[in-house]
Structure formats: C-alpha cells, structure tokens
Image (cartoon, rainbow, N blue to C red):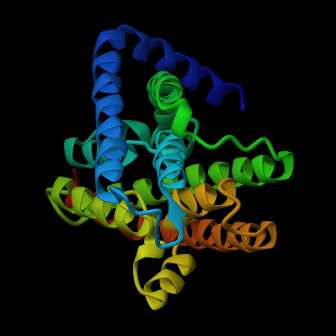
C-alpha cells in the first residue's frame, strides 16, 4: 500500500506542472456543458415535458450527469498500449510490484489534479445555472449515488486497462479506443437520456455497466428511480467488475506470452 501511495503522490506532483494545460481543457469542458444546456432549452421551446422530464429536470440531468462523468473517466488505455508498443513493459515487468498495480496507481495520481479541477469547473457551471438546477439533499440517495460512482470509476479503470492490452495484438489502438468511448457515452446516456429510446434498448443498457456512470445515478438524483433499483444497479456493477478482472487476467497471460515470444 505504501508503494502505491508513493506512486500516486509522485504522479500527482508531476501533473501539477501542467496546470495551465489542465485549466485550458477545463474551460473547454465548461463551454461544452453550457452549450448542451442551451441546446436543450431551445429544443424544449414551449413544451412542458419530453419523455417525462421537465426542462429543469433535463438541465439538472445534464449538469449532474457531467459531474459523474468527469469523476470516473481516465486515459489508462493509451498508457498501457504505449508501454506495450514502445517496449516499456519489459522494464515494468522486473519491478517488485505488479504492472497492474503500478499502472493503475500511476493513472490515479496522473488524473487526480484534472479530476478535481473538472469537478470544480462543473460546479461553477451548476452555480451559473442555479436557477434551473434541482437540488437534492436526500442522504440515502446521495450515499447510493456515491457508491455507484465509485464502482463506475473502478469499472472504467478495468475497461480502459483491458482496451490497452489489445496492443499485444494490434499496432494501433487509438481508433478502437475512440470508438469504444463513443459507444460507452451513448449507452451511458451522456448524449441524451436513454429513456428517450425504445424500452428494449433501455433494458439492454441496464445489463451493461455504462448506464451506471451517468444515466442511472442522475435518475436516482432526480427521484426518477427507486433506491431498490439503484441497489440492483450496484449488484450489476459488482458482477461486471468481477467479470472484467477475470477477463483481464486471461488476456494478460495470453498477451504476455505473445509479447515475450516476439522479443519486444
């Protein structure tokens, strides 16, 4: 644990040297969310509700959902793929700690500063639209949402790590990663609430892990989903975390044999 904390601290400090770059990206994020709010305001026009959501609920959905999104995202796939393609994995394999623990700790330290600044920037946007934002201070719902976001963060780390391991077999993973990111955002309700889609699609989405990173916690926040449904969602997330970890072990062992076999 001490080694992990040391790595996280080291990459946290390294990230602080890029404060301006991080700030510039956060400005872009704020602008994107503001545009989404204005877009939905224009779409509603004189309509009272769309798919059971009032304009204030839709604005809250966008604002609170993006808070969850910036809290769980990471860029681990590109790091893992880069280590494999550049041969840096060879040095990592001789470290006294596993590559998995090292790269996860490194990524947590690397993204911490950006994540905190993203949360603050999203909070600024919420305050700007405070008149259209619905506040919910129900402690049980907040605790349930917190648990769901933590599990979503773990799920995203594992999924990104798994995508990065594909570099054992292909030379270029950026295109695949970008495609997967768009699919994840679609199924998570990041582009629009998945409740706008056919019921069959919504049911399939609830079997996947993505909806629990945006749509479901936002619905729980808006009191559109029961606490029991949220608890069932936690179980789905736990199953996915176990499944992803098992798949990672299989892919890692097979990929490592290929890596050592070609002598990279």
Question: Seen from this angle, which residue lies furthest bottom?
Answer: 200
The answer to which quarter of the image holds residue 184 is bottom left
In the displayed structure image, the side of residue 210 where residue 164 appears, left or right: left
- Foreground pick, 1 / 199: 199
- Foreground pick, 262 / 71: 71
The answer to which quarter of the image holds residue 232 is bottom right
Q: Is residue 106 visible?
A: yes
Residue at 63% from the left image edge and 50% from the top image edge:
149
Q: Is residue 260 visible?
A: no
In the picture, which quadrant includes the N terminus? top right
Q: Where residue 151 sits: x, y (%)?
A: 65, 55
Residue at 52% from the left image edge and 23% from the top image edge:
120
Residue at 33% from the left image edge and 13% from the top image edge:
18
Q: Where residue 109 sits: x, y (%)?
A: 52, 27
Q: Where residue 121 sits: x, y (%)?
A: 45, 24
Q: Is residue 89 above or below residue 196?
A: above
């Amino acid at each position: 644990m001490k080694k992990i904390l040391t790595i996280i601290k080291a990459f946290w400090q390294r990230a602080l040297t890029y404060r301006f770059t991080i700030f510039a990206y956060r400005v872009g994020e704020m602008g994107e969310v503001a545009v989404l709010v204005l877009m939905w305001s224009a779409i509603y026009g004189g309509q009272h509700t769309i798919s059971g959501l009032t304009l204030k609920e839709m604005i809250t959905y966008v604002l609170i959902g993006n808070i969850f999104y910036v809290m769980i995202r990471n860029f681990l796939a590109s790091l893992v793929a880069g280590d494999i393609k550049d041969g840096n994995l060879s040095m990592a394999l001789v470290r006294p700690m596993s590559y998995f623990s090292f790269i996860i700790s490194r990524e947590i330290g690397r993204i911490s500063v950006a994540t905190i600044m993203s949360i603050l920037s999203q909070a600024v946007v919420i305050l700007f639209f405070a008149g259209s934002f619905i506040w919910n201070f129900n402690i049980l719902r907040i605790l349930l949402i917190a648990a769901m976001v933590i599990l979503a963060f773990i799920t995203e780390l594992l999924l990104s790590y798994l995508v990065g391991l594909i570099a054992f077999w292909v030379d270029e993973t950026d295109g695949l990663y970008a495609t997967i990111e768009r699919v994840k955002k679609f199924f998570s309700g990041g582009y629009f609430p998945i409740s706008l889609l056919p019921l069959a699609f919504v049911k399939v989405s609830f079997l996947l892990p993505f909806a629990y990173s945006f749509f479901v916690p936002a619905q729980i926040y808006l009191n559109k989903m029961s606490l029991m449904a949220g608890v069932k969602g936690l179980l789905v997330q736990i199953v996915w975390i176990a499944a992803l970890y098992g798949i990672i072990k299989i892919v890692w062992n097979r990929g490592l044999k290929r890596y050592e076999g070609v002598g990279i």
